[in-house]
Image: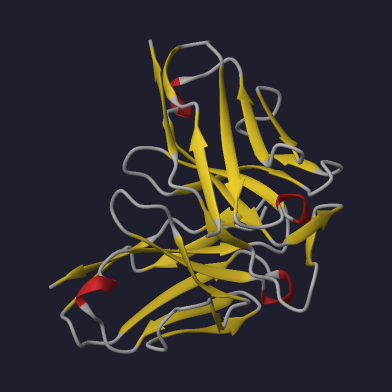
């Protein structure tokens, strides 16, 4: 079964740090790019970060640039999001999402005949920033 | 950054009725890389439509997507009880990927 399982969320103080993990199973992890997407309580979806299959291309939303670091370990089938200098507005459910394309120069392209985009999502992990 | 604007914010309909959801982009969406997601309370988003009009695996044919350029539509031909949820459009042809603010389809 294709599956993504996030972990590492919790309660953290304002200005603190947290590392999220996303464990993948049921498919060839190294063939895919990944994204982190978050959802603040009662709000919509916000894309946070993208990493290509080889880690050669990384993008961040302006709201987290300079504070969050995305990374992956293809040998461990795992995706990570290191978060520093956490703010109130970072309180959200964080989802990892598989991506079947590749991005370069700010544009994104299919790897194969179809381009599904973010086709598989984890169940999410909750980050609460408290003052 | 491509801004996606969804309308209406809330759609109040009865089971069996037709739902029409709109997503308008601030600039043309690259190669119609436009997706629709369904999200129910406490659950992760679920991919319904990719490439503006292709149903994802296992999605019933009462869901259909259309449009190109800057105007896209998700249609649910006959609402089933399990279809009442929030729907998001998303463009994935450029970075940053962006989502619409969502349309809630609620039971009338």
Q: Nearer the viewer, residue A10 or B7?
A: A10
Q: Is residue A40 above or below residue B83?
A: above
- How many numbered circles are shown? 0
- Residue at point 71% right, 76% down? A114
How far from the left and from the top, in percent, is residue B15?
17, 82
Horizontal arrangement in the rendering, residue A80 relative to residue B7 (left or right)? right
Which residue is found at the position 66% from the left and 62% from the top? Answer: B92
Identify the residue at image location x=77%, y=50%: A30
Task: Return the x and y of residue B67 as percentages of the image width and height.
Answer: 57, 83
Q: Does residue B12 appear in the picture of this structure?
A: no
- Residue drawn at x 50%, y 43% is A5
Q: Specify whether A110 is left or right of B48.
A: right
Closest to the observer: A72 or B82?
A: A72
The relative height of residue B63 versus residue B81 in the rendered view (above or below) is: below
Q: Position of residue A55 (x, y in %)?
A: 82, 41
| Residue closest to the eye, B56 or A25 | A25
Give whichever of B22, A10 is nearer the camera.
Answer: A10
| The quarter of the displayed image where residue A108 is located | bottom right
Q: Is residue B25 above or below residue A27?
A: below
- Colour style of the rendered protein structure: secondary structure
């Amino acid at each position: 079964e294709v599956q993504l399982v996030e972990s590492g969320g919790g309660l953290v103080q304002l200005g603190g740090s947290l590392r999220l993990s996303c464990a993948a199973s049921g498919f060839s992890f190294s063939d895919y790019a990944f994204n982190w997407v978050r959802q603040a309580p009662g709000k919509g979806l916000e894309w946070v970060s993208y990493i290509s299959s080889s880690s050669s291309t990384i993008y961040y939303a302006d709201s987290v640039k300079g504070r969050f670091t995305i990374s992956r370990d293809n040998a461990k089938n795992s995706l990570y999001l290191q978060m520093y200098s956490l703010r109130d507005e970072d309180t959200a459910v964080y989802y990892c999402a598989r991506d079947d394309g590749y991005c370069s120069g700010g544009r994104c392209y299919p790897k194969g005949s179809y381009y599904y985009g973010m086709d598989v999502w984890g169940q999410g992990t909750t980050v609460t920033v408290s003052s | 950054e491509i801004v996606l604007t969804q309308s209406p914010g809330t759609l109040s309909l009865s089971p069996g009725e037709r739902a029409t959801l709109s997503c308008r982009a601030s600039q043309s969406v690259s190669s119609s890389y436009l997706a629709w997601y369904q999200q129910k309370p406490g659950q992760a988003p679920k991919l319904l439509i990719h490439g503006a009009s292709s149903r994802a695996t296992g999605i019933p044919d009462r869901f259909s997507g259309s449009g190109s350029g800057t105007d896209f539509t998700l249609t649910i031909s006959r609402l089933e009880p399990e279809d009442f949820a929030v729907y998001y459009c998303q463009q994935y042809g450029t970075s940053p990927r962006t989502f619409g603010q969502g349309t809630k389809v609620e039971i009338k």
